[in-house]
Each structure stands twice: as C-alpha cells, then as structure tokens.
DNA sequence: CTGTATCCTTTACGATACTG
DNA sequence: CAGTATCGTAAAGGATACAG
C-alpha cells in the first residue's frame, strides 16, 4: 500500500453486472452508442413525437444524409428500438415508429436532452470562462 | 396539399426553443455529443461514483487511451460539467470531479445507461431475430 | 418515395515517444 | 503522475449517382 489511491471508491467488481457498459467488450456499450450517437439520439428523439416516414425524418433531423439515416435506422431496428413498416404501394411508403423498448429508452434520453437544452446558458457561460482564462 | 404527409405531427416551430438540439448549428448538439459520446458518457459515469485521478479514470474506463481521456476531460471541463483540481506536489496530483451541473447531467445519463444494461437481453433477442430473418 | 452503391474527404482514434 | 506532440491508420461521414 505505497501509492495514494483515492479512498472509498469501490471497484465495481462487487456488483458483477452481466452487461456492465464500462467493460470494453460488452455489447451494451455498442447499443448505448447506437442510442446516444449523433444521429441515433436525434432520430429517436424525432420518433418520440410520432411515426414518421423516411424523408420526413430526413427533414426533421437537420443535417443528416440519406446514407447516415438509413444506416442509423437499420442499427436501431436491429437493436429492437425502432419498428419499420413498409407498404407495398406505388410510390412506396415506409413508416418508422418506436417499439415499447424504444419508447422506454427515449423517455430517458429525452429527459437528458431536455436538461441539456435547459441548461445551455450555464454551459455557454462555463465555456466563455474557460476560454477567457486560457483553457486551464 | 397533394402529398400524403403523416398527420398530426406538429412541426416544432410553435415551440421556438432557443437551444433546439434538432437544429443543425445549435451549440446544444455539440454539448450533447460531449456527454453522450463513447468516452464522454463513460467518463461521466465513472465520476458519478467519486472523485478520481487521471490514471484512476484511465483504468476505470476500460479501453480509453491517454489522448482520448485527456481530450474528453478538456471538453467536459470546458462545458462546465467536470471540475479539475491540480495540486502542485511532486509527483503531481490532479483530481477530477463533477460540478453541480455535471451531477444533474449524470443523473439522467445513468438512468439511461442503467435502463440499457437492464434491457440488454431484449436487445440481444431483437438482434438475433433481425439477423435470422436476413435483415429486413 | 425509399433506399443502395460508390467514391472521396475528413475526422476520430490508437500507439508511441517525450516533457514537466 | 499527468499530461502533450506527432504520426499513421481506421472509421465516419458527405456527395452523387443510380435502382426498385
């Protein structure tokens, strides 16, 4: 016991969670990234309000490309968060909506997003202070 | 009104939020990415338990490199989420902990992470079903 | 309309070496 | 211990063209 470790921080071994996101190879880390990634979070947020079609989503999520939206939707569908419903009409119509699991996830996600939006003035003030004192 | 839009989805104009994360150029989008990014979320999660030093964090956040941890901590400090306290001892000691704003953010973030960890069996099952039916 | 395929650029990341 | 600097690679992302 020579080194001075920070006391009283239990190493998480005693919890032994099956899907501990802090572990490198854990699948939950990948899923969390799908949810919280740049396009994943915005896509889920957009779908929290209502069912949307591909191009409606594209317009709602400002800045997303066709490629990224397609890729994002695939990942979210595969993880069981988004449901894809295709109608074989002409022109084709595909609707995307949240699954029950997706709604549970989005509830927590939006709670975070809303908090960040609400507190942006504080963040901006912190940034200015940080930059003013020269990034220390 | 020729096209068949999804009905009853209010375009968010009538809310007129100052920091709408759905808008491309909004600073809240960048902050959200700092929080939810691969290393940001894990770093914040690690700090939710206790104050940690640089190398303690490095060990706790499995897989993070020195460079990314340093970069991540700078971004979080600049956004006012993490506080950095340096002691001019030899060897030097630097402690990182959450600010009040950081704690508020982490509370919601952990709520999301915990949900994802809890529901991973469902996610895994959805993936298997998706892959089995050939990704449709 | 709803995508996929391709190419190309930019960014993120990791490894390593080095400084105070 | 706590980082910064540099370099090379890998992945993410955007633009465009095209298909069902």
Image: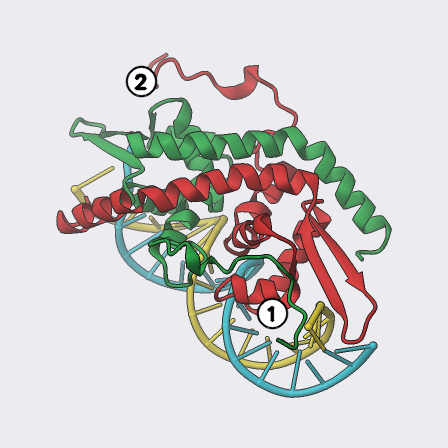
Chain colours: A red, B green, C yellow, D cyan
Q: Foreground residue, B13 or B25?
A: B13
Identify the mark nearer the N-term, 2 or 1: 2
Q: Foreground residue, B19 or B35?
A: B19
* Location of residue B54 (image quadrant): top left
Residue at point 37%, 22% (across, down) = B50
Q: Foreground residue, B89 or B87?
A: B87
A63 w.r.t. A116: above or below:
below
Q: Position of residue A45 (x, y in %)?
A: 54, 50
Residue B41 visible? The answer is: yes
Residue at point 57%, 50% (across, down) = A49
Quarter of the image for the N terminus of chain A: give it. top left
* Label 1: element kind: helix
Q: CA–CA distance between discs 2 and 1?
A: 52 Å
Residue A22 visible? The answer is: no
Q: Mark 2 points at which residue?
A: A4
Q: Where is residue A55 in the image (x, y as percent from the top left)?
A: 62, 68
Q: Position of residue B95 (x, y in %)?
A: 28, 28
B23 w.r.t. B65: above or below:
below
Q: Which chain carries label 1?
A: A
Q: How crowded is mark 2: few (under 14 residues within 10 Å), some or many (20 or more)?
A: few
Q: Are marks 2 and 1 in contact (CB under 8 Å)?
A: no
Q: Which chain carries label 2?
A: A
- Residue extending furthest toward the right: B133
Q: Where is residue A98 in the image (x, y as percent from the top left)?
A: 66, 47
Q: In the picture provided, is A109 more to the left or to the right than B81?
A: right
Q: In the picture provided, is C4 more to the left or to the right than B15?
A: right
Given this view, does label 2 or label 1 mark the residue nearer the observer? 1
Quarter of the image for the C terminus of chain A: give it. top left
Residue at point 26%, 33% (across, down) = B83
Instruction: Name the disc covering residue A42, or none.
Output: none
Residue at point 15%, 30% (across, down) = B88
Q: Name the residue under label 1.
A: A66
């Amino acid at each position: 016991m020579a080194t001075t470790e920070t006391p009283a921080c239990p190493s998480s071994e005693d919890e032994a969670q099956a899907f501990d996101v802090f572990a490198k190879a854990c699948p939950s880390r990948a899923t969390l990234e799908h949810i919280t990634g740049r396009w994943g979070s915005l896509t889920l947020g957009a779908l929290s309000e209502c069912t949307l079609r591909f191009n409606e989503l594209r317009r709602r999520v400002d800045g997303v490309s066709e490629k990224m939206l397609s890729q994002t939707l695939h990942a979210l569908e595969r993880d069981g968060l988004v449901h894809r419903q295709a109608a074989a009409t002409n022109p084709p119509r595909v609707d995307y909506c949240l699954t029950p699991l997706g709604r549970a996830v989005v509830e927590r996600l939006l709670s975070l997003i809303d908090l960040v939006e609400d507190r942006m003035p504080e963040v901006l003030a912190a940034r200015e202070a940080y930059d003013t004192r020269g990034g220390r």
